[in-house]
Amino acid sequence: MKTVVAAAIVRDQKLLLAQRSYPDDVAGLWELPGGKVEDGEAVSVALEREIAEELSVRIGIGRGVGEPVVLRDNLILVARHAWLVEGEPVAVEHSAVTWVSAGELGAMARAGELVPADAVWLDDLVALLGESE
């Protein structure tokens, strides 16, 4: 089973989202940034590497967020709570990045602006934002 990992990066009660530029079926939608875990790579190491590549920042990584989401028969998506350690996020591999509040996140989910796999975690993400007060 292959794993894709996503970072729920929180700062000042806001969540960092990145706008997909590809593939066509999700281009323009917003997601938690992250990427594939390479064979033999720890999830936390993969997440640190992917976030450095995608956003040019260093992060700290905490506990899991929500339950794993099955993307395909051999692929699962997991999310981890994270925070910025160094740098300001830059959209290196995405169209844009933005910080959203719990209310804004809910509105985006209702409008269908989140990638479907991440929308599964809406309640978990809203709860995470509430904990960061």
Image (cartoon, rainbow, N blue to C red):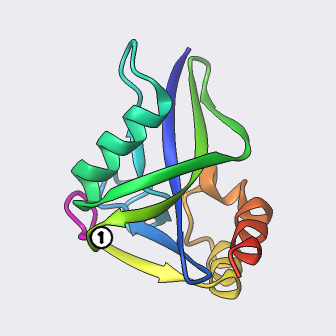
Which quarter of the figure is the N terminus placed in?
top right
Q: Which residues are magenta?
A: 89-94
Q: Which residue is mark 1?
A: 89
- Where residue 70 appears, x then y in whole percent? 66, 31
In this rendering, would 100 be left or right of 57? Answer: right
* SS assignment at label 1: loop
The residue at 77%/60% (across/down) is 124
Above or below, 30 against 7 in this view is below
- Magenta residue check for 93: yes
- Where residue 45 appears, x then y in whole percent? 39, 33
In this rendering, would 22 be left or right of 66? Answer: left
Q: Quadrant of residue 90 in the image?
A: bottom left
- Where residue 30 appears, x then y in whole percent? 47, 67
Above or below, 17 against 34 in this view is below
Towards the viewer: 65 or 83: 83
Towards the viewer: 95 or 91: 91
- Where residue 133 appears, x then y in whole percent? 71, 82
How would you classify the magenta stretch by its main secondary structure? loop
